[in-house]
Protein backbone atom coordinates (compact mmCIF):
# COMPACT_ATOMS: atom_id res chain seq x y z
CA UNK A 1 0.00 0.00 0.00
CA UNK A 2 2.76 2.34 1.07
CA UNK A 3 4.85 1.35 -1.93
CA UNK A 4 1.97 2.01 -4.33
CA UNK A 5 1.38 5.46 -2.85
CA UNK A 6 5.05 6.39 -3.20
CA UNK A 7 5.09 5.20 -6.76
CA UNK A 8 2.05 7.37 -7.56
CA UNK A 9 3.72 10.42 -6.10
CA UNK A 10 6.87 9.70 -8.05
CA UNK A 11 5.00 9.52 -11.32
CA UNK A 12 3.46 12.94 -10.50
CA UNK A 13 6.85 14.71 -10.08
CA UNK A 14 7.48 15.31 -13.82
CA UNK A 15 3.93 16.71 -14.13
CA UNK A 16 4.51 19.11 -11.22
CA UNK A 17 7.82 20.32 -12.58
CA UNK A 18 6.17 20.83 -15.99
CA UNK A 19 3.50 22.92 -14.32
CA UNK A 20 6.09 24.90 -12.43
CA UNK A 21 8.00 25.54 -15.66
CA UNK A 22 4.81 26.76 -17.31
CA UNK A 23 4.04 29.02 -14.39
CA UNK A 24 7.54 30.48 -14.44
CA UNK A 25 7.36 31.02 -18.23
CA UNK A 26 4.01 32.72 -17.78
CA UNK A 27 5.37 35.00 -15.06
CA UNK A 28 8.50 35.83 -17.04
CA UNK A 29 6.34 36.73 -20.03
CA UNK A 30 4.01 38.73 -17.81
CA UNK A 31 6.85 40.65 -16.15
CA UNK A 32 8.57 41.09 -19.51
CA UNK A 33 5.42 42.64 -20.99
CA UNK A 34 5.04 44.98 -18.05
CA UNK A 35 8.70 45.98 -18.28
CA UNK A 36 8.49 46.47 -22.02
CA UNK A 37 5.37 48.60 -21.83
CA UNK A 38 7.00 50.58 -19.04
CA UNK A 39 10.12 51.16 -21.20
CA UNK A 40 7.97 52.12 -24.22
CA UNK A 41 5.96 54.49 -22.06
CA UNK A 42 9.07 56.00 -20.51
CA UNK A 43 10.45 56.65 -23.98
CA UNK A 44 7.24 58.24 -25.25
CA UNK A 45 7.28 62.03 -25.10
CA UNK A 46 5.18 63.75 -22.44
CA UNK A 47 2.43 65.82 -24.07
CA UNK A 48 1.52 69.19 -22.62
CA UNK A 49 -1.92 70.47 -23.58
CA UNK A 50 -2.39 74.18 -24.11
CA UNK A 51 -5.62 75.96 -25.07
CA UNK A 52 -5.24 79.21 -27.05
CA UNK A 53 -7.42 81.67 -28.96
CA UNK A 54 -7.15 80.35 -32.54
CA UNK A 55 -5.39 83.44 -33.97
CA UNK A 56 -2.61 83.07 -31.37
CA UNK A 57 -1.74 79.53 -32.46
CA UNK A 58 0.18 80.12 -35.74
CA UNK A 59 2.43 82.83 -34.25
CA UNK A 60 3.49 80.42 -31.46
CA UNK A 61 4.21 77.53 -33.81
CA UNK A 62 7.87 78.37 -34.48
CA UNK A 63 8.66 78.86 -30.81
CA UNK A 64 7.01 75.52 -30.01
CA UNK A 65 8.98 73.72 -32.73
CA UNK A 66 12.23 75.14 -31.38
CA UNK A 67 11.31 74.08 -27.86
CA UNK A 68 10.43 70.55 -28.96
CA UNK A 69 13.69 70.23 -30.91
CA UNK A 70 15.62 71.15 -27.75
CA UNK A 71 13.43 68.91 -25.55
CA UNK A 72 12.75 65.70 -27.49
CA UNK A 73 10.92 64.21 -24.50
CA UNK A 74 8.21 66.90 -24.49
CA UNK A 75 5.50 67.67 -27.02
CA UNK A 76 3.13 70.62 -26.90
CA UNK A 77 -0.36 69.98 -28.12
CA UNK A 78 -2.17 73.17 -29.05
CA UNK A 79 -5.94 73.23 -28.79
CA UNK A 80 -7.31 76.11 -30.82
CA UNK A 81 -10.23 77.82 -29.10
CA UNK A 82 -12.51 80.74 -30.01
CA UNK A 83 -11.03 84.18 -30.73
CA UNK A 84 -12.49 86.04 -27.80
CA UNK A 85 -10.71 86.09 -24.46
CA UNK A 86 -14.02 85.64 -22.56
CA UNK A 87 -14.81 82.41 -24.35
CA UNK A 88 -11.33 81.00 -23.75
CA UNK A 89 -11.67 81.91 -20.09
CA UNK A 90 -15.03 80.11 -19.94
CA UNK A 91 -13.48 76.96 -21.42
CA UNK A 92 -10.64 76.94 -18.90
CA UNK A 93 -13.06 77.71 -16.06
CA UNK A 94 -15.49 74.94 -16.90
CA UNK A 95 -12.70 72.40 -17.34
CA UNK A 96 -11.28 73.25 -13.92
CA UNK A 97 -14.69 73.29 -12.26
CA UNK A 98 -15.66 69.93 -13.71
CA UNK A 99 -12.32 68.44 -12.61
CA UNK A 100 -9.95 66.27 -14.63
CA UNK A 101 -8.98 69.25 -16.81
CA UNK A 102 -6.92 68.21 -19.85
CA UNK A 103 -4.82 71.37 -19.77
CA UNK A 104 -1.26 71.44 -18.43
CA UNK A 105 -0.18 74.92 -19.45
CA UNK A 106 -2.69 77.72 -18.86
CA UNK A 107 -2.51 80.53 -21.38
CA UNK A 108 -3.79 83.50 -19.38
CA UNK A 109 -4.96 86.95 -20.31
CA UNK A 110 -3.41 89.61 -18.08
CA UNK A 111 -6.70 89.90 -16.12
CA UNK A 112 -7.22 86.28 -15.09
CA UNK A 113 -4.56 85.50 -12.48
CA UNK A 114 -6.45 86.61 -9.35
CA UNK A 115 -9.54 84.57 -10.24
CA UNK A 116 -7.66 81.43 -11.28
CA UNK A 117 -5.25 81.61 -8.34
CA UNK A 118 -8.00 82.32 -5.78
CA UNK A 119 -9.89 79.28 -7.05
CA UNK A 120 -6.80 77.11 -6.50
CA UNK A 121 -6.44 76.11 -10.15
CA UNK A 122 -2.82 77.20 -10.59
CA UNK A 123 0.50 75.98 -9.34
CA UNK A 124 2.44 78.48 -7.24
CA UNK A 125 5.57 79.46 -9.21
CA UNK A 126 7.06 81.78 -6.58
CA UNK A 127 9.96 79.54 -5.55
CA UNK A 128 10.89 78.71 -9.10
CA UNK A 129 11.95 82.24 -10.09
CA UNK A 130 14.49 84.54 -8.46
CA UNK A 131 13.25 88.09 -7.82
CA UNK A 132 16.12 89.52 -9.94
CA UNK A 133 14.97 87.40 -12.91
CA UNK A 134 11.56 89.09 -12.67
CA UNK A 135 13.19 92.52 -12.89
CA UNK A 136 13.93 91.91 -16.58
CA UNK A 137 10.17 92.07 -17.32
CA UNK A 138 7.77 95.00 -17.37
CA UNK A 139 6.64 95.72 -13.82
CA UNK A 140 2.94 95.65 -14.52
CA UNK A 141 3.12 92.41 -16.50
CA UNK A 142 4.75 90.79 -13.50
CA UNK A 143 2.39 92.46 -11.04
CA UNK A 144 -0.49 90.94 -12.99
CA UNK A 145 0.95 87.46 -12.40
CA UNK A 146 0.87 87.79 -8.59
CA UNK A 147 -2.01 86.97 -6.28
CA UNK A 148 -1.77 87.51 -2.52
CA UNK A 149 2.02 87.71 -2.67
CA UNK A 150 2.58 84.59 -4.78
CA UNK A 151 3.47 84.29 -8.44
CA UNK A 152 1.25 82.23 -10.76
CA UNK A 153 1.91 83.53 -14.27
CA UNK A 154 4.86 84.65 -16.37
CA UNK A 155 4.22 86.94 -19.34
CA UNK A 156 5.05 85.81 -22.88
CA UNK A 157 3.88 89.00 -24.52
CA UNK A 158 2.55 92.32 -23.44
CA UNK A 159 -0.13 94.39 -25.12
CA UNK A 160 -1.36 97.93 -24.90
CA UNK A 161 -4.22 99.89 -26.42
CA UNK A 162 -3.32 102.75 -28.76
CA UNK A 163 -4.60 105.04 -31.47
CA UNK A 164 -3.78 104.30 -35.11
CA UNK A 165 -4.23 107.03 -37.68
CA UNK A 166 -3.81 107.58 -41.39
CA UNK A 167 -0.69 109.72 -41.39
CA UNK A 168 -0.93 110.25 -45.16
CA UNK A 169 -4.46 111.68 -45.04
CA UNK A 170 -3.83 113.90 -42.05
CA UNK A 171 -0.70 115.34 -43.64
CA UNK A 172 -2.41 115.97 -46.97
CA UNK A 173 -5.21 117.81 -45.19
CA UNK A 174 -2.76 119.76 -43.03
CA UNK A 175 -3.78 118.28 -39.65
CA UNK A 176 -1.53 117.52 -36.72
CA UNK A 177 -2.31 114.17 -35.04
CA UNK A 178 -5.19 114.65 -32.57
CA UNK A 179 -4.51 115.17 -28.88
CA UNK A 180 -8.02 115.49 -27.49
CA UNK A 181 -11.33 113.72 -28.04
CA UNK A 182 -12.54 116.93 -29.62
CA UNK A 183 -9.61 117.00 -32.08
CA UNK A 184 -10.40 113.47 -33.14
CA UNK A 185 -14.03 114.36 -33.81
CA UNK A 186 -13.09 117.54 -35.69
CA UNK A 187 -10.48 115.91 -37.94
CA UNK A 188 -12.75 112.94 -38.64
CA UNK A 189 -15.62 115.21 -39.69
CA UNK A 190 -13.38 117.34 -41.89
CA UNK A 191 -11.95 114.29 -43.70
CA UNK A 192 -15.42 112.78 -44.08
CA UNK A 193 -16.97 115.99 -45.35
CA UNK A 194 -14.38 116.56 -48.06
CA UNK A 195 -14.86 112.96 -49.20
CA UNK A 196 -11.34 111.83 -48.27
CA UNK A 197 -12.64 108.89 -46.25
CA UNK A 198 -15.97 107.22 -45.45
CA UNK A 199 -15.62 106.98 -41.69
CA UNK A 200 -13.66 108.74 -38.99
CA UNK A 201 -13.08 106.39 -36.09
CA UNK A 202 -13.51 102.65 -35.41
CA UNK A 203 -13.41 101.06 -31.97
CA UNK A 204 -14.52 97.82 -30.30
CA UNK A 205 -18.15 98.25 -29.22
CA UNK A 206 -19.43 94.68 -29.04
CA UNK A 207 -20.54 93.38 -25.63
CA UNK A 208 -17.31 91.58 -24.61
CA UNK A 209 -14.00 92.07 -22.82
CA UNK A 210 -12.50 94.07 -25.70
CA UNK A 211 -15.09 96.82 -25.17
CA UNK A 212 -14.10 97.02 -21.51
CA UNK A 213 -10.44 97.46 -22.45
CA UNK A 214 -11.42 100.19 -24.91
CA UNK A 215 -13.72 101.88 -22.37
CA UNK A 216 -11.08 101.90 -19.63
CA UNK A 217 -8.94 104.08 -21.90
CA UNK A 218 -11.67 106.60 -22.68
CA UNK A 219 -12.60 106.65 -18.99
CA UNK A 220 -9.01 107.38 -17.99
CA UNK A 221 -8.82 110.05 -20.71
CA UNK A 222 -11.69 111.86 -18.95
CA UNK A 223 -10.02 111.45 -15.56
CA UNK A 224 -12.38 108.71 -14.38
CA UNK A 225 -11.92 105.20 -13.03
CA UNK A 226 -13.79 101.89 -12.91
CA UNK A 227 -12.79 100.04 -9.71
CA UNK A 228 -10.00 101.11 -7.41
CA UNK A 229 -8.34 97.77 -6.59
CA UNK A 230 -7.04 99.01 -3.24
CA UNK A 231 -10.17 100.59 -1.80
CA UNK A 232 -12.71 98.71 -4.00
CA UNK A 233 -14.37 102.06 -4.67
CA UNK A 234 -16.48 102.00 -7.84
CA UNK A 235 -16.44 105.02 -10.18
CA UNK A 236 -18.58 104.16 -13.19
CA UNK A 237 -21.56 106.30 -12.15
CA UNK A 238 -19.46 109.45 -11.79
CA UNK A 239 -19.65 112.35 -14.28
CA UNK A 240 -16.30 111.33 -15.87
CA UNK A 241 -17.77 107.96 -16.85
CA UNK A 242 -20.85 109.64 -18.30
CA UNK A 243 -18.59 111.95 -20.32
CA UNK A 244 -16.72 108.91 -21.61
CA UNK A 245 -19.99 107.31 -22.75
CA UNK A 246 -21.13 110.57 -24.26
CA UNK A 247 -17.98 110.72 -26.39
CA UNK A 248 -18.55 107.20 -27.72
CA UNK A 249 -22.24 107.88 -28.36
CA UNK A 250 -21.33 111.07 -30.21
CA UNK A 251 -19.10 109.14 -32.60
CA UNK A 252 -22.14 107.01 -33.51
CA UNK A 253 -24.72 109.84 -33.53
CA UNK A 254 -22.53 112.08 -35.67
CA UNK A 255 -21.76 109.17 -38.01
CA UNK A 256 -18.05 109.41 -37.31
CA UNK A 257 -18.15 105.71 -36.50
CA UNK A 258 -20.12 103.24 -38.60
CA UNK A 259 -23.45 102.14 -37.08
CA UNK A 260 -22.18 98.55 -36.79
CA UNK A 261 -19.41 99.62 -34.42
CA UNK A 262 -21.41 98.41 -31.41
CA UNK A 263 -21.06 94.86 -32.75
CA UNK A 264 -17.37 95.00 -33.67
CA UNK A 265 -14.52 93.15 -32.02
CA UNK A 266 -10.81 93.66 -32.75
CA UNK A 267 -10.67 91.88 -36.05
CA UNK A 268 -13.80 93.63 -37.44
CA UNK A 269 -12.28 97.00 -36.64
CA UNK A 270 -8.89 96.03 -38.04
CA UNK A 271 -10.39 94.92 -41.37
CA UNK A 272 -12.33 98.17 -41.59
CA UNK A 273 -9.23 100.28 -41.06
CA UNK A 274 -7.05 97.95 -43.15
CA UNK A 275 -9.34 98.35 -46.16
CA UNK A 276 -8.90 102.10 -46.02
CA UNK A 277 -12.40 102.81 -44.69
CA UNK A 278 -11.52 104.80 -41.57
CA UNK A 279 -9.05 107.51 -40.56
CA UNK A 280 -8.63 106.38 -36.91
CA UNK A 281 -8.66 103.06 -35.10
CA UNK A 282 -8.31 102.10 -31.44
CA UNK A 283 -6.57 98.74 -31.20
CA UNK A 284 -3.63 96.65 -29.95
CA UNK A 285 -0.15 96.66 -31.51
CA UNK A 286 -0.72 93.43 -33.49
CA UNK A 287 -2.44 95.57 -36.14
CA UNK A 288 0.81 97.34 -37.02
CA UNK A 289 2.48 94.25 -38.52
CA UNK A 290 -0.57 93.17 -40.53
CA UNK A 291 -1.39 96.68 -41.75
CA UNK A 292 2.18 97.20 -42.97
CA UNK A 293 2.54 93.87 -44.74
CA UNK A 294 3.55 94.02 -48.41
CA UNK A 295 0.50 94.64 -50.53
CA UNK A 296 -1.65 95.97 -47.70
CA UNK A 297 -3.80 98.91 -48.89
CA UNK A 298 -2.46 101.02 -46.01
CA UNK A 299 1.17 99.83 -46.09
CA UNK A 300 3.43 102.67 -44.93
CA UNK A 301 0.48 105.07 -44.56
CA UNK A 302 -0.23 104.75 -40.87
CA UNK A 303 1.19 105.97 -37.58
CA UNK A 304 0.41 105.32 -33.92
CA UNK A 305 0.09 107.47 -30.86
CA UNK A 306 -1.24 107.25 -27.33
CA UNK A 307 -5.03 107.52 -27.08
CA UNK A 308 -6.63 110.97 -27.16
CA UNK A 309 -7.82 112.52 -23.89
CA UNK A 310 -9.83 115.44 -22.52
CA UNK A 311 -8.01 118.79 -22.13
CA UNK A 312 -5.73 118.72 -19.06
CA UNK A 313 -6.10 114.96 -18.67
CA UNK A 314 -3.76 112.11 -19.59
CA UNK A 315 -3.98 109.48 -22.29
CA UNK A 316 -5.40 106.19 -21.09
CA UNK A 317 -3.70 103.02 -22.28
CA UNK A 318 -5.11 99.70 -21.20
CA UNK A 319 -2.56 97.02 -20.43
CA UNK A 320 -3.29 93.74 -22.15
CA UNK A 321 -1.14 90.71 -22.73
CA UNK A 322 -0.82 86.99 -22.33
CA UNK A 323 1.24 84.76 -20.11
CA UNK A 324 1.58 81.18 -18.96
CA UNK A 325 0.83 79.36 -15.75
CA UNK A 326 0.67 75.67 -14.84
CA UNK A 327 -2.59 73.92 -14.03
CA UNK A 328 -2.50 72.48 -10.52
CA UNK A 329 -4.11 69.33 -11.91
CA UNK A 330 -1.35 68.79 -14.48
CA UNK A 331 0.51 65.49 -14.20
CA UNK A 332 3.55 67.06 -15.84
CA UNK A 333 4.38 70.20 -13.87
CA UNK A 334 8.15 69.87 -14.37
CA UNK A 335 7.84 69.61 -18.14
CA UNK A 336 5.35 72.49 -18.14
CA UNK A 337 7.81 74.60 -16.17
CA UNK A 338 10.54 73.79 -18.73
CA UNK A 339 8.24 75.07 -21.47
CA UNK A 340 7.50 78.29 -19.56
CA UNK A 341 11.20 78.87 -18.93
CA UNK A 342 11.91 78.48 -22.63
CA UNK A 343 9.01 80.63 -23.87
CA UNK A 344 9.90 83.47 -21.53
CA UNK A 345 13.66 83.29 -22.15
CA UNK A 346 15.43 86.23 -23.76
CA UNK A 347 16.41 84.31 -26.91
CA UNK A 348 13.04 82.72 -27.58
CA UNK A 349 11.26 86.02 -26.91
CA UNK A 350 13.60 87.86 -29.26
CA UNK A 351 12.89 85.53 -32.13
CA UNK A 352 9.16 85.52 -31.37
CA UNK A 353 8.95 89.32 -31.31
CA UNK A 354 11.12 89.72 -34.43
CA UNK A 355 8.90 87.34 -36.28
CA UNK A 356 5.49 88.51 -35.04
CA UNK A 357 5.87 92.14 -33.97
CA UNK A 358 4.05 91.55 -30.68
CA UNK A 359 4.81 93.78 -27.73
CA UNK A 360 7.66 92.27 -25.70
CA UNK A 361 7.33 91.74 -21.99
CA UNK A 362 11.11 91.83 -21.49
CA UNK A 363 12.18 95.46 -21.18
CA UNK A 364 15.50 95.10 -23.03
CA UNK A 365 13.81 93.92 -26.19
CA UNK A 366 12.08 97.27 -26.77
CA UNK A 367 15.47 98.83 -27.56
CA UNK A 368 17.22 95.79 -29.02
CA UNK A 369 18.97 97.05 -32.21
CA UNK A 370 17.72 94.24 -34.44
CA UNK A 371 14.17 94.59 -33.17
CA UNK A 372 14.22 98.40 -33.49
CA UNK A 373 15.56 98.09 -37.06
CA UNK A 374 12.44 96.10 -37.92
CA UNK A 375 9.97 97.90 -35.62
CA UNK A 376 11.16 101.50 -35.24
CA UNK A 377 8.14 102.39 -33.09
CA UNK A 378 9.12 100.04 -30.23
CA UNK A 379 11.05 102.54 -28.07
CA UNK A 380 7.96 104.79 -28.18
CA UNK A 381 5.79 101.80 -27.40
CA UNK A 382 7.79 101.17 -24.23
CA UNK A 383 6.75 104.59 -22.92
CA UNK A 384 3.11 103.83 -23.64
CA UNK A 385 3.28 100.39 -22.01
CA UNK A 386 4.97 101.78 -18.93
CA UNK A 387 2.10 104.26 -18.49
CA UNK A 388 -0.57 101.66 -19.14
CA UNK A 389 -3.27 100.87 -16.58
CA UNK A 390 -4.16 97.39 -15.43
CA UNK A 391 -7.79 96.49 -15.37
CA UNK A 392 -8.51 95.96 -11.63
CA UNK A 393 -6.63 92.86 -10.46
CA UNK A 394 -9.39 91.47 -8.26
CA UNK A 395 -10.58 87.88 -7.87
CA UNK A 396 -14.11 88.88 -8.99
CA UNK A 397 -12.79 90.48 -12.18
CA UNK A 398 -14.80 88.26 -14.55
CA UNK A 399 -18.12 89.21 -12.92
CA UNK A 400 -17.20 92.90 -12.62
CA UNK A 401 -16.30 92.96 -16.29
CA UNK A 402 -19.49 91.16 -17.23
CA UNK A 403 -21.55 93.79 -15.40
CA UNK A 404 -19.74 96.63 -17.16
CA UNK A 405 -20.04 94.91 -20.55
CA UNK A 406 -23.81 94.54 -20.20
CA UNK A 407 -24.58 98.08 -19.09
CA UNK A 408 -22.04 99.73 -21.37
CA UNK A 409 -23.55 97.94 -24.32
CA UNK A 410 -27.08 98.94 -23.19
CA UNK A 411 -26.00 102.60 -23.03
CA UNK A 412 -24.20 102.54 -26.37
CA UNK A 413 -27.10 100.93 -28.20
CA UNK A 414 -29.75 103.20 -26.64
CA UNK A 415 -31.42 100.40 -24.71
CA UNK A 416 -30.89 102.39 -21.50
CA UNK A 417 -30.00 105.99 -20.79
CA UNK A 418 -26.29 106.33 -19.89
CA UNK A 419 -27.23 107.62 -16.41
CA UNK A 420 -29.50 104.68 -15.60
CA UNK A 421 -27.15 102.15 -17.12
CA UNK A 422 -24.11 103.39 -15.23
CA UNK A 423 -25.98 103.74 -11.94
CA UNK A 424 -27.11 100.12 -12.29
CA UNK A 425 -23.60 98.98 -13.28
CA UNK A 426 -22.05 100.78 -10.31
CA UNK A 427 -24.57 99.41 -7.81
CA UNK A 428 -24.28 95.85 -9.07
CA UNK A 429 -20.48 96.10 -8.94
CA UNK A 430 -20.61 97.47 -5.39
CA UNK A 431 -22.82 94.57 -4.30
CA UNK A 432 -20.47 92.10 -5.98
CA UNK A 433 -17.39 93.52 -4.32
CA UNK A 434 -19.10 93.65 -0.94
CA UNK A 435 -20.09 89.99 -1.02
CA UNK A 436 -16.66 89.10 -2.36
CA UNK A 437 -14.84 90.72 0.54
CA UNK A 438 -15.40 87.73 2.80
CA UNK A 439 -15.25 84.91 0.25
CA UNK A 440 -13.43 84.76 -3.04
CA UNK A 441 -15.85 83.83 -5.75
CA UNK A 442 -15.06 82.35 -9.12
C1 LIG B 1 -6.09 91.46 -26.26
C2 LIG B 1 -5.38 91.78 -24.96
C3 LIG B 1 -6.12 91.22 -23.79
C4 LIG B 1 -7.54 91.72 -23.81
C5 LIG B 1 -8.23 91.35 -25.12
C6 LIG B 1 -9.62 91.94 -25.20
O1 LIG B 1 -5.98 90.10 -26.53
O2 LIG B 1 -4.06 91.28 -24.97
O3 LIG B 1 -5.50 91.57 -22.58
O4 LIG B 1 -8.30 91.27 -22.72
O5 LIG B 1 -7.46 91.82 -26.20
O6 LIG B 1 -10.25 91.58 -26.36
Image (cartoon, rainbow, N blue to C red):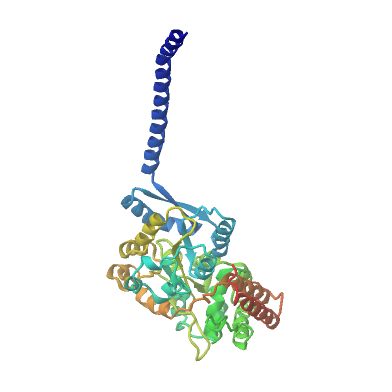
The residue drawn where x is 46% and y is 83% is: 175
Q: Quick check: 65 above or below 398?
A: above
The foreground one among 374 and 298 is 374
Q: Is residue 242 left or right of residue 106?
A: right
Residue 147 placement (x, y as % from top left): 48, 72
Quarter of the image where one finds residue 413: bottom right
Seen from the viewer's position, the closer of residues 226 and 170 is 226
Is residue 149 among what the camera can see? yes
Residue that lies at the very extreme toward the left in this rendered image: 369
Q: Is residue 381 left or right of residue 97?
A: left
Report if residue 299 is visible in the image. Answer: no
Q: Residue at x 33, y 61 (%)?
A: 348
Q: Quadrant of the C terminus?
A: bottom right
Q: Relative to 281, does residue 237 appear above or below in the rendering?
A: below
Q: Is residue 126 above or below residue 172?
A: above
Q: Position of residue 242 (x, y in %)?
A: 63, 84
Q: Within the image, what quadrant is residue 288 found in?
A: bottom left
The residue at 50%/54% (across/down) is 80
Which residue is rendered at x = 62% and y = 87% of the image?
Answer: 238
Residue 149 falls in which quadrant of the image? bottom left
Image position, residue 181 (x, y; %) = 54, 84
347 w.r.t. 222: above or below: above
Residue 252, percent from left and from top = 63, 76
Would residue 90 appear left or right of 383 to someone viewing this image? right
Amino acid sequence: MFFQKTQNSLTKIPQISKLLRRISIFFSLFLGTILLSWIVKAQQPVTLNLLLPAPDAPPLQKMIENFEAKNPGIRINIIEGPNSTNLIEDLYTSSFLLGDSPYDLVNMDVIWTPKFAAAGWLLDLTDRVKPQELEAFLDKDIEAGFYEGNLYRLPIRSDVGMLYYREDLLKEAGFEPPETFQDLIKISQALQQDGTINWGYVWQGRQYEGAVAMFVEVLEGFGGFWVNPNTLEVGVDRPEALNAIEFLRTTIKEEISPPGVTTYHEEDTRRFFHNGQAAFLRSWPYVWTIANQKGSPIEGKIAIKPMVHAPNQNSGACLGGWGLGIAKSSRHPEEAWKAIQYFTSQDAQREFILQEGYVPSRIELFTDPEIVAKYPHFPQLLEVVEQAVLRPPIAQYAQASDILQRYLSAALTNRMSPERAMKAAANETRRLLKTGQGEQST
